[in-house]
Image (tube, rainbow, N blue to C red):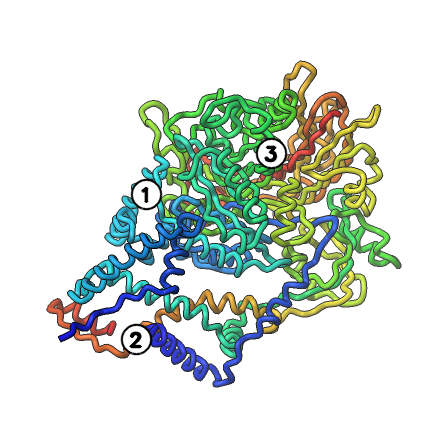
Amino acid sequence: MKQVKDKIVIDSFLINELSAKYKMQWKHEPGLKELTGLIDTYVEQEVLYREALSMNLDRNDEVIKRTLAKKMEFLSDDLSESLEPTESMLRTYYETHKDNYVKPPFYSLKQVYFSTDKRSEAWKDAEKALSEKQPENSGDLLPIPMQYSNTNATKLALDFGQGFAASLDSLPIGKWTGPVKSGLGVHLVFILDKYPSGFFSFEEVANKVKVDYSFETSTAFRKELIATMLKKYTINIDVSDVELNKALHEKF
Amino acid sequence: MKKFQYLVLLAIAILFLNACDQSGSKNEVANESEQTSNETNITSNPYNDVYWGDTHLHTSYSTDAGMIGNTLGPEEAFKFARGEEVTSSTGLKAKLTRPLDFLVVSDHAENLGLAPAINESDPELLKFEWGKYEHDLVKEGKGFEAYMNWEDKTAAADDPLKGNDALTRSYWNKSLDAAKKYNEPGKFTSLIGFEWTSGPDGNNLHRNVIFRDNEDKASQIIPFSLYDSQDPEKLWEWMQAYEKNTGGKLLAIPHNGNLSNGLMFDDVTLFSKIPLDSKYAESRQRWEPIYEVTQMKGTGEAHPFLSPNDEFSDYGIWDKGSFGAEPKTKEMLHKEYVREAYKRGLQYENILGVNPFKFGLIGSTDAHNSLSSIDENNFFGKAIVTEPYTTGRFSQTITGVFQDRVKQDITIRAYNTLSSGYAAVWAKSNTREDLWDALKRKEVYATTGTRIKVRVFAGWEYTPADITNKDMVKIGYEKGVPMGGDLSNAPEGKAPTFMVSALKDPDWANLDRVQIIKGWVDAKGNSHERIFDVAVSNNRVINEEGLCITKVGNTVNVKEATYQNTIGAANLTTFWKDPDFDPKRRAFYYIRVLEIPTPSWVAYDQVKYKTKAPDDAVLMQQERAFTSPIWYTPK
């Protein structure tokens, strides 16, 4: 009777793979001699590997177990990355985490500065200037802009201080008003336009939503995957320790 | 492939369930083009805006962070820096008072990712005998023992995972992925970088390497580590090779000369011990245009021993030794501090024709807990073991671990840590390219953590009227150079003129004074320094020597950790002309801005957490800014 033999295939796929590995290490293509050497090593390893499998040497080996489990986890990570969340999933995430997408108010404004360094009565001087026809002709120099266009309150807080940015909300639009205190001194402010605070639209923050979603779900996905796989198994608990027994039953 | 198909099916099942759970609408994949279109709206200012950031931050990927409890990776670091709340590794809610504009996650190159690899039982790690041994130690609860094993290896420059490129590459790529995700041009910039941790005998020669490039180029290498070489010249060769191979651009930022025991600005090369030559000087100037002058482990601008006439030279001095066993001696100091390096750089230029120590200044944190949080009243500490509420908050040993205690105690503990500093960058826009270009041309400055806005221009033609002109900045660029720039060709009979403007942090303390610090070399080749007070608050007098000897005052209440802005100024802007200029002599000028006294983080801590710091703790201080110099070179 003719013995059925296992096959070891040496084809162009294998050769390409071996060449690529060689090239990564040595930075040049293998020659004929190197290549036959690589194939020789491959065949040797393959034979030993298959014989080991047929003897079930892979069973209950801690290193192999860990490696395979890790491979599965990597596969699941790759999957969770390669499977793009759908827009509806991202929109749902956006809706349920809307507090993360608060939009500060935006302002277009002009300001005139009254320096507390230079004036003993900066507040009064500002009040006086307000009662005059053209307040912008008064005031002191400041090495930040006199006019801001469509600027968010976070940026204004960086330039003028958080208190100033917060107080803009209650100011009337379309006229000189004040005095308003800032971290730098006293100002008269003309609000040209205001876009009240609210939430960034999904479209405005789509990128951020996607990043936030993936940050939160990469571990969640793995857990869910394991839970789904677990459904194929029953877990028999056979432990004599009462406390441990109880804890395990609660867990599974 | 069968198994892969099985997984795909599972995954689809999960996704399908999710979709049904969430309203059952169509499975549309989010439109990619819509998302990228947000990037086009980047504001650009030809006269530059100041952007705030940290070029030096460690996450769990740094072994000396991850193996002692930091569980926050690069993603959390970016989230925190851009202003989001994160939970610290010790379980505290952490949020910046004000967001930063940019961040470099600069994890140590040496065994990058070792801690998370242990945590995740990474098979690439377990392939190595030492990796498995360390892994098992940690999993048995012997994490500190495992960490000390690694310390021993790295101190001996012996890579315990030699040949582990695959492991390092996988964590480098993860770090790059995070940087890519959080980089939003015009809004928040993640610059790519890493730290090369050279420290022969525990003497600090660390450099942070910063990329101008995106991930496509940065992913072509793995970070250069001390295992590759401890020699800065080898680092520069590696940087040059990277630029040649990828077409990318790199710069390196050294830090903590104060812990180098005289090696940071030495007169000889590190290993061959030959005197610095013009080739060395050219390379150093090319690759290291910036120095990190202040951070949590001290400030390295000036030292009282070197500048006895400078009453403000004692800010955050760490001068007991290095990380090694050898105590500090006075002979080391002049090779550790910036002002002295600038002066010696001019002397070298006289001899070599090139200045080896020509660099600008930034500050950064060097925090090891993924949190760039250095407001005095919101300080999250240097490491996990010094976060608020920890027992090590004040007492943790930071340097002096390996000392010979019998001889002389050179321990420096956590209560001496500075809540410092930040990098301020004058750039056209908040993008990787513009920020990097500003670092390269040195149009940057350091603060000890507050957001003082400083500008300086130097030229030959400014007039006192220019500083009251609304177009001062435009005039500044047209008729001269900004910080980090060069003056030459002094016109007959002219001296350099300066326009300086300092604006207080609007949410912090007023300003005490603005100083110009000048250094020069005389006809005999001797170096000198002189400090000029050029603008002071509260109408105090600047005398004929150019100094204001009246102190600004002090409103600090240490017991309650408060101060009042009833003294000091909001804005100090001035015109200054060098009264003592010799066109034949090399010189440099940089600006130092001082705030009024405020409580230190230790004082805030004592009130907030009802703790008591050691008696010699610094409880009040004057925070400050240091700009990059402007150099004058005679023709």
CB of mark 2 within 8 Å of CB of mark 3?
A: no
Label 1, label 2: how many angstroms apart (C-alpha)? 37 Å
Is B550 situated above or below A25?
above
Residue A229: mark: 2
Q: Residue at x 24, y 58 (%)?
A: A63
Disc 1/disc 3 C-alpha distance (Å)? 34 Å
B450 or B203: which is nearer to us?
Answer: B203
Query: Residue B416, located in which quarter of the rendered image?
Result: top left
Name the chain under label 1. Answer: B
Q: Is residue A120 left or right of residue B268?
A: right
Residue bearing the label numbered 3: B285
> In this rendering, is residue B1 above or below B547?
below
Q: Are marks 1 and 2 on the same chain?
A: no
Q: Earlier in the sequence, mark 1 or mark 3?
A: 1
Return the mark for residue B160: 1
Q: Position of residue B139 (x, y in %)?
A: 26, 54
**Residue type (three-letter) at the residue carrying disc 3:** Gln
Dot 1 falls on a residue whose secondary structure is: loop
Q: Nearer the viewer, mark 1 or mark 2?
A: 1
**Helix, strand or loop under label 3:** helix
Q: Amino acid at mark 2?
A: Met
Whether residue B268 is visible, yes or no, is yes
The disc numbered 3 marks a residue on which chain?
A: B
Q: Position of residue B251 (x, y in %)?
A: 57, 42
Which kind of residue does numbered mark 1 sit on?
A: Pro
Q: Which residue lies most toward the bottom here?
A: B24
Compared across the picture, whether A248 is left or right of A182 comes to: left
| Rendering coords of residue A108 (x, y %) | 74, 63
Q: Is residue B456 above or below residue B33?
A: above
